[in-house]
C-alpha cells in the first residue's frame, strides 16, 4: 500500500485528550520531530549495513542484527542514534525501539522513524509512543490489508504532552527508576517460580519420610501405629474375601508385601506397605471395541481419561466425557476418593477422584482402605514419578505395566499423621500457587503502563 510520509499541515493550537498541568502544552509529533533521510542503501553504504525490520524485533528491543549487503526494497530509511523506530504494521504496533549508536543503519518502511528535535528529549518521546494512551489512538487508524498499517502521516499528526525540557529529563529519570524496580520485581518472581519446583520436591520428600511432621509427631502419639493400621487392613481384606460366596474353594490371593531390603529407616510408628495392600488396586476397564462406539457415551457416568488425570494437579474435579449404561457395563465404576495413576503416555501422573467415575485400562486405580488417605498416597507417588517414568520402556508411546506399581514400597504413617501431612502440603501448595500466579500474570506490564499514564498526566512531576 502507498505510505504517507509528510505530516499534514495544521494551524492553531493542538487539542489533547486531557488537561495538562501548567507549563505543559500539547504538540503534534510532526512539529517536534524530524524525518530521516531516505534512499537506497547502496547509495550510502559501500559494503554491509545493519537492516532493521519488524519481523526480527522483540517488543522494545532491537536484538543482534546481522550486517547484510542486500535488503528488500523497503529498506529505505537511514537511521541515527536516538531515533525512535515505531512499527506501524499490525500485529507489530508494540514493536517500537529507541535506537542506540550501534543498533542499526537502515530501517524498513514498515517503521515510522521519529527523530526528536533539540527541545524534545528522545527518551521522553519513546516512553510516550510506547504508552497505552498513544497506541490506543493508532489502532483505529489502521488502513488497508495484507497487512493493515498506520500511515506515517497519521502517526505524526498525533498529539504529544510536552513539559519544559528540564521536567522532561526529570520524568524520564523517574520513569526509568520505577521501571527498574518493576524489572527487579519480575526477576524476583521468575527466580521464585524457578526455585519453587525444587522447594516442592524437597517438601514432598520431607513429607513422605516423616521429616515434615517430626515436631507434630512428638506431641501427638498415635492411637494406631502404621504397622497396626496395615495389619488391620490386611485382616479386614482377608475376612471380606473369605466371606464372599463367590470365592468359596479358592485360595486367598495375598497382596504382595514390599521388599524392604536397602530401604531407609522410617519413623518409629510408620510401616512399609504396597499399593495392593492398602486398598482395592487394579487397572480401569474399557472392554468394548471399537472404543469410539457412540453407544458407549452420553449417559450419567463420568468417564475420566489420562489427559484429565495428567492435568488435574492432584484433584480430579471435572470430566469431558460420560458413559451410558452400555459404557458402564463394559467398564467399572470406581468410588469417590479413588487415586488414579496413569500408566500410558503420561507416566505416573496422579489425581484423586472427587466423584465416582470410570476410566480406561491406561489408568490404575487405588480405592484406599479405611484409614488410608488417598491424598497422602497421591503425594507419595508424586515423589516417585520421575523414577517410575525413567523405568518405562523406550517405545513409541511410553507405558508401564501393573506390576511396576504393584511392588513399589509405600511409607505408611498412622492415619492422623497422614491427615496432618496432607493439610500442611495443601497450605504449602496454596502459597506456591500464589507465587506462580504472580509470575505468570506478568503484573509488570500493567505496572509500567500505570507509571507512564501517571507521568504524562503530570502526576510524577511533584
Image (cartoon, rainbow, N blue to C red):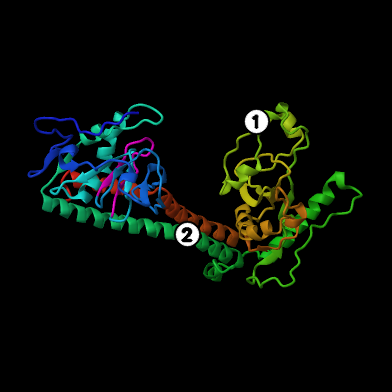
Q: Residue at x 53, y 69 (%)?
A: 219
Q: Residue at x 56, y 57 (%)?
A: 422
Q: Residue at x 38, y 49 (%)?
A: 442
Q: Majority secondary structure of the magenta segment?
A: loop
Instruction: Report the front residue among 252 and 120.
Output: 120
Q: At which x and y percent is residue 375? A: 60, 53
Numbered badge on residue 248: none
Q: Which residue is mark 1?
A: 300
* Residue range (magenta): 83-100
Q: Is residue 449 left or right of residue 401?
A: left
SS class, disc 1: strand
Instruction: Report the front residue among 96 and 318.
Output: 96
Judge whether residue 462 can be spotted in this image: no
Q: Is residue 430 left or right of residue 122?
A: right
Instruction: Report the front residue among 124 and 146.
Output: 146
SS class, disc 2: helix
Residue 76: quarter of image: top left
Q: At which x and y percent is residue 265? A: 66, 73
**Residue 160 position (above or below residue 375):** above
Q: Is residue 461 part of the magenta span, yes or no? A: no
Q: Which label lies toward us, 1 or 2?
A: 2
Q: Which residue is mark 2?
A: 194
Q: CA gap, disc 1 to disc 2?
A: 42 Å
List the single residue furthest toward the right. Answer: 249
Label 1: few (<14), some or many (≥20) within 10 Å? few
Q: Earlier in the sequence, mark 1 or mark 2?
A: 2
Quadrant where the image shows the N terminus: top left
Amino acid at each position: 500500500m502507498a505510505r504517507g510520509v509528510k505530516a499534514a499541515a495544521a494551524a492553531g493550537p493542538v487539542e489533547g485528550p486531557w488537561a495538562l498541568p501548567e507549563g505543559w502544552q500539547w504538540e503534534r509529533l510532526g512539529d517536534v520531530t524530524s524525518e530521516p533521510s531516505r534512499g537506497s542503501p547502496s547509495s550510502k553504504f559501500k559494503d554491509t549495513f545493519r537492516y532493521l525490520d519488524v519481523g526480527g524485533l522483540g517488543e522494545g528491543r532491537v536484538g543482534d542484527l546481522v550486517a547484510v549487503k542486500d535488503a528488500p526494497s523497503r529498506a529505505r530509511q537511514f537511521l541515527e542514534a536516538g531515533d525512535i523506530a515505531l512499527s506501524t504494521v499490525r500485529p507489530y504496533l508494540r514493536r517500537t525501539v529507541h535506537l542506540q549508536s550501534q543498533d542499526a543503519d537502515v530501517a524498513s518502511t514498515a517503521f515510522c522513524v521519529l527523530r526528536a528535535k533539540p527541545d524534545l528529549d528522545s527518551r521522553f518521546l519513546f516512553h510516550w509512543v510506547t504508552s497505552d494512551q498513544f497506541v490506543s489512538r493508532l489502532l483505529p487508524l489502521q488502513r488497508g490489508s495484507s497487512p493493515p498499517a498506520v500511515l506515517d502521516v497519521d502517526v505524526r499528526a498525533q498529539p504529544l504532552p510536552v513539559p519544559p525540557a528540564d521536567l522532561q529529563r526529570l520524568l524520564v529519570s523517574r520513569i526509568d527508576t520505577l521501571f527498574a524496580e518493576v524489572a527487579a520485581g519480575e526477576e524476583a518472581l521468575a527466580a521464585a517460580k524457578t526455585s519453587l519446583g525444587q522447594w516442592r520436591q524437597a517438601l514432598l520428600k520431607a513429607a513422605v519420610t516423616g521429616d515434615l511432621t517430626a515436631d507434630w509427631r512428638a506431641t501427638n502419639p498415635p492411637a494406631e501405629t502404621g504397622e497396626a493400621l496395615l495389619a488391620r487392613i490386611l485382616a479386614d481384606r482377608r475376612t471380606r474375601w473369605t466371606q464372599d460366596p463367590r470365592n468359596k474353594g479358592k485360595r486367598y490371593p495375598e497382596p504382595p508385601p514390599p521388599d524392604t531390603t536397602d530401604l531407609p529407616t522410617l519413623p518409629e510408628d510408620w510401616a512399609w506397605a504396597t499399593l495392593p495392600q492398602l486398598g482395592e488396586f487394579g487397572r480401569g476397564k474399557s472392554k468394548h471395541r471399537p472404543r469410539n462406539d457412540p453407544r458407549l457415551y452420553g449417559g450419567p457416568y463420568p468417564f475420566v481419561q489420562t489427559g484429565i488425570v495428567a492435568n488435574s494437579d492432584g484433584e480430579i474435579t471435572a470430566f469431558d466425557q460420560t458413559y451410558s449404561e452400555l459404557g458402564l457395563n463394559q467398564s467399572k465404576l470406581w468410588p469417590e476418593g479413588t487415586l488414579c495413576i496413569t500408566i500410558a503416555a503420561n507416566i505416573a501422573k496422579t489425581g484423586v477422584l472427587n466423584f465416582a467415575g470410570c476410566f480406561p485400562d491406561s489408568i490404575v486405580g487405588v480405592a484406599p482402605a479405611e484409614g488410608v488417605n488417598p491424598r497422602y498416597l497421591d503425594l507419595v507417588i508424586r515423589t516417585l514419578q520421575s523414577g517410575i517414568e525413567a523405568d518405562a520402556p523406550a517405545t513409541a508411546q511410553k507405558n508401564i505395566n501393573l506390576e511396576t506399581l504393584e511392588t513399589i514400597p509405600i511409607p505408611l504413617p498412622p492415619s492422623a499423621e497422614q491427615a496432618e501431612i496432607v493439610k500442611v502440603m495443601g497450605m504449602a501448595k496454596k502459597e506456591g500457587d500464589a507465587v506462580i500466579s504472580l509470575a505468570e500474570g506478568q503484573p509488570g506490564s500493567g505496572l509500567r503502563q500505570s507509571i507512564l499514564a501517571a507521568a504524562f498526566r503530570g502526576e510524577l512531576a511533584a
